[in-house]
């Protein structure tokens, strides 16, 4: 049994992760951490990592980027792996994660959806196969409360397309005014915000007289929680080093 501790356990995503973990025969939900004490799926929720009595194999963190130092400190102290599912990490945060990877096994990805990570691989292969005769444009759609644009997932897909094309590309986020003819080195990225859209990503390869479109639509945030559960099963017991969803689906 893989012992799981959920950080941000009383938030929307934390509760879904706790629900899935409690229902999975391979996992044991030992508790959670949140701003206030409580209970989730019958397991205790502590207000601080310092109060956690149980020994976790994996921490699944859906709290916030501001909590990164506390999460990594607990993981380093106990030797457990950690799945970093929060958003908004800064360059300094990423440096902290890289440093922690020398001692523990942090799992960090722009999107925990298994489908999105499959899309990432398909985009890379499509760009490699189609080549310079095709232009790549990415459209991402999210709910009206999302604060960042473009999404981290859109940027991840753009990086995959760039890699497939051989690296000689630059990202253009939206266009306005007399921008002139499209530069062949561009990968366009466009953000749409509205309603309660969970997350939609479309990658279009437009060539001479034909268009190839690859897309993914998340209909519920449960897909991200399910991805976190799959990641927990994968990373438990792994040696120190950075991991992501490409390792899981690979």
Image (cartoon, rainbow, N blue to C red):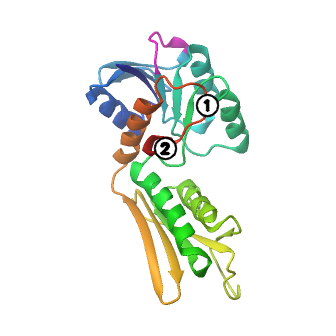
Residue drawn at x 41%, y 39% as measured from the top left:
13
Q: On the rendered structure, is 194 left or right of 240?
A: left
- Specify the quadrant of the image occupied by residue 167: bottom right
Q: Against 39, is 244 above or below?
A: below
Magenta stretch?
50-57
Along the line of sight, which residue is nearer the eye, 158 or 190? 158
Q: Between residue 165 and residue 231, name the one nearer to us.
A: 165
Q: Could you tell me residue 242's position as x and y percent? A: 60, 35
- Mark seen at residue 241: 1
- Disc assigned to residue 183: none
The residue sitting at 64% across, 29% down in the picture is 101
Q: Nearer the viewer, residue 233 or 110?
A: 233
The reply to whether the magenta stretch includes residue 52 is: yes
Secondary structure of residue under mark 1: loop
Could one spot residue 144 in this view of the protein?
no
Q: Which residue is mark 2?
A: 245
Q: Position of residue 222 (x, y in %)?
A: 34, 45
> Looking at the magenta stretch, what is its main secondary structure?
loop
**Which residue is at the front of the view, 62 or 12?**
62
Q: Marks 2 and 1: CB-CB under 8 Å?
A: no
- The quadrant of the image that shows the N terminus is top left
């Amino acid at each position: 049994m893989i012992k799981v501790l959920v950080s941000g356990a009383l938030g929307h995503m934390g509760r879904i992760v706790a629900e899935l973990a409690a229902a999975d025969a391979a996992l044991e939900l030992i508790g959670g951490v949140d701003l206030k004490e409580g209970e989730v799926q019958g397991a205790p929720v502590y207000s601080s990592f310092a109060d956690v009595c149980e020994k976790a194999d994996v921490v699944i963190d859906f709290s916030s980027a501001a909590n990164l130092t506390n999460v990594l400190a607990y993981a380093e102290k106990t030797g457990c792996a950690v799945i970093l599912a929060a958003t908004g990490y800064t360059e300094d945060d990423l440096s902290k994660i890289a440093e922690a990877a020398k001692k523990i096994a942090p799992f960090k990805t722009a999107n925990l959806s298994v489908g999105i990570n499959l899309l990432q691989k398909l985009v890379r292969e499509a760009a490699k196969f189609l080549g310079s005769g095709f232009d790549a444009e990415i459209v991402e759609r999210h709910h009206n409360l999302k604060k960042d644009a473009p999404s981290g997932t859109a940027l991840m897909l753009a990086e995959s397309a760039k890699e497939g094309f051989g690296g000689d590309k630059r990202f253009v986020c939206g266009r306005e005014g007399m921008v002139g003819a499209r530069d062949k080195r561009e990968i366009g990225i466009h953000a749409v915000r509205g309603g309660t859209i969970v997350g939609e990503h479309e990658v279009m390869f437009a060539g001479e007289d034909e268009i190839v479109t690859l897309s993914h639509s998340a209909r519920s945030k449960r897909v991200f929680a399910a991805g976190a559960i799959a990641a927990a099963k994968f990373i438990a017991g792994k040696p120190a080093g950075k991991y992501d969803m490409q390792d899981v689906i690979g």
